Image: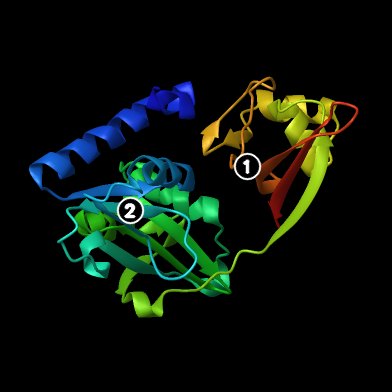
């Protein structure tokens, strides 16, 4: 039985990467610290390595409820702590009275300095305070190069993780029935949108499944898939619960409030 049958075609390259990490740590007794991973990538690593007694697997991307995390793989005798993950927390000092910043503004400025998204963890916005997490190996570069957002000058200040903002995400769970597990059908059910409104969102690249843009309405979803629809928010297909007497598919899902 091939391990690939448990994953999508587009996930195979990442599966191969995880398998190479597993081999490196297991047979060469080395340590592996990954870049920041999205939750689906974390799930894949957990599925492949989570039950391997010869490898210690841990995740960290900040305190409390965080989405993007680094994975640390090592032989079981290696002690793992917060410092093992080489993360840096920055707070953004900016002219609060004259500037209202959103998540996309901050992420856009971080991407503009030439680093890949995988070098950054979560961005936290609470009241007028803004923080973000980055990999320690690029922290000095980020501190020097992020000097403005839009037309406003900003300054970064390192903070201990004890000062990290705690932003609690609220989700609501619901259930429904679907004619199929096509992406357009699932979006229509979760966000209460007609198919005529779903199609333009797909064509414009406004829909992501597991953090990747998907433009085809016929794309098939599976349990635990994460969805994001611009202007409508995030959701997750939790479980496929069976079929009704009329052949409809019963599903449960959650939506971020």
Q: Quadrant of residue 63?
A: bottom left
Residue 224 at what x, y percent from top left? 59, 42
Q: Mark 1 falls on what kind of element?
A: strand
> Tag on residue 180?
none
Label 1 packing within 10 angstroms: few (<14), some (14-19), many (20+)? many
Indicate whether 36 appears above or below 242.
Answer: below
> Tag on residue 228?
1
Indicate whether 251 appears above or below 54.
Answer: above
Q: Mark 2 falls on what kind of element?
A: strand
The residue nearer to you, when weighing 6 against 90, is 6
| Residue depth check, mark 1 versus mark 2: number of the one nearer the observer | 2
Give the residue drawn at x 32%, y 44%: 49
The residue nearer to you, when weighing 173 against 51, is 51
For disc 2, the marked residue is 70
Label 2 packing within 10 angstroms: few (<14), some (14-19), many (20+)? many
The residue nearer to you, when weighing 42 against 194, is 42
């Amino acid at each position: 039985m091939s391990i690939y049958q448990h994953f999508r075609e587009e996930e195979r390259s990442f599966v191969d990467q995880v398998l190479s990490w597993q081999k490196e740590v297991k047979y060469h007794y080395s340590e592996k610290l990954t870049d920041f991973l999205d939750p689906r990538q974390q799930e894949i690593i957990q599925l492949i390595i989570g039950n391997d007694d010869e490898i210690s697997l841990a995740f960290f991307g900040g305190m409390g409820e965080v989405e993007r995390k680094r994975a640390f793989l090592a032989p079981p005798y290696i002690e793992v702590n917060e410092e093992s993950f080489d993360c840096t927390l920055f707070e953004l000092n900016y002219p609060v009275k004259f500037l209202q910043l959103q998540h996309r503004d901050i992420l856009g400025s971080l991407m503009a300095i030439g680093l890949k998204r995988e070098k950054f963890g979560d961005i936290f916005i609470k009241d007028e305070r803004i923080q973000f997490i980055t990999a320690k190996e690029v922290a000095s570069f980020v501190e020097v190069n992020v000097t403005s957002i839009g037309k406003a000058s900003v300054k970064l200040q390192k903070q201990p993780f004890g000062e990290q903002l705690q932003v609690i995400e609220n989700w609501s769970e619901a259930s429904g029935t679907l004619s199929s597990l096509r992406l357009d059908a699932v979006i229509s059910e979760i966000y209460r949108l007609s198919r005529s409104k779903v199609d333009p969102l797909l064509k414009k690249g406004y829909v992501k499944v597991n953090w990747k843009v998907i433009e085809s309405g016929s794309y098939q979803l599976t349990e635990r898939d994460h969805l994001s629809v611009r202007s409508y928010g995030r959701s997750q297909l939790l479980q496929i619960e069976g079929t009704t007497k009329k052949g409809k598919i019963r599903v449960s899902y959650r939506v971020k409030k």
